[in-house]
């Protein structure tokens, strides 16, 4: 779970320690950013960071990687999950989904210009590269994959 920030206390602190600030916002990610004005443009900057938080972030990232590797080592059939999800090759499914999402996003209208945002630069080249370098999933067999694997969706045990 994400803890709420006491915006009033934070703004009081920031007035004493940060030159020019704009409204403070809390995002649904592992870092909170403060927007500052620089040359008339809002740029995200990270303030009040210390080495302990950097060490903690590195430690949590290492644990996340180890957890993902542990998930990958499990055989879903041996866990009784034979009928839980799709059994077709994972990476081609992901490329198909990614392509569908990219196409939909390319048709989104830019607020300022009123025009479609267009394709992601080098998208076709990237998809082509992935298709040429797909792993042979017949060698690894079916594996468990977390569809939204990020720190916001993890629970860390203190022990």
Image: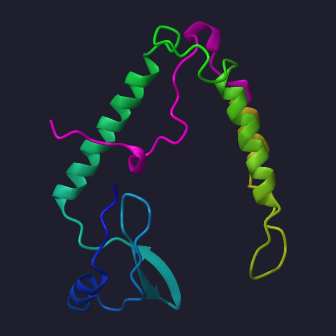
In the displayed structure, does residue 101 sit left or right of residue 135?
Answer: right
The residue under the point 26% across, 92% down is: 15
Main secondary structure of the magenta stretch: loop
107 inside magenta stretch: no
State whether residue 149 is above or below residue 33: above
151 inside magenta stretch: yes
State whether residue 158 is above or below residue 87: below
Q: Position of residue 47 (x, y in %)?
A: 29, 73
Q: Nearer the viewer, residue 8 or 57?
A: 8
Tell me the magenta residue range.
131-159
Q: Position of residue 7 (x, y in %)?
A: 31, 82
Q: Nearer the viewer, residue 72 or 46?
A: 72
Q: Is residue 122 visible?
A: no
Query: Dividing the image into 4 quarters, which one contains the N terminus?
Result: bottom left
Q: Quadrant of residue 93?
A: top right
The residue under the point 79% across, 43% down is: 124
Q: Is residue 120 visible?
A: yes
């Amino acid at each position: 779970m994400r803890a709420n920030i006491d915006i009033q206390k934070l703004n009081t602190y920031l007035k004493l320690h940060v030159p020019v600030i704009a409204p403070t916002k809390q995002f649904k990610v592992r870092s909170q950013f403060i927007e500052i004005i620089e040359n008339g443009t809002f740029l995200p900057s990270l303030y009040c960071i210390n080495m302990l938080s950097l060490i903690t972030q590195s430690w949590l990232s290492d644990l996340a990687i180890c957890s993902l590797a542990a998930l990958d080592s499990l055989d879903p059939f041996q866990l009784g999950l034979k009928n839980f999800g799709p059994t077709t090759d994972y990476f081609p499914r992901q490329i198909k989904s990614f392509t569908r999402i990219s196409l939909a996003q390319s048709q989104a209208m830019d607020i300022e210009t009123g025009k479609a945002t267009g394709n992601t630069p080098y998208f076709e080249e990237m998809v082509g590269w992935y298709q040429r370098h797909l792993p042979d999933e017949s060698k690894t067999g079916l594996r468990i994959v977390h569809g939204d694997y990020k720190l916001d969706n993890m629970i860390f045990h203190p022990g």
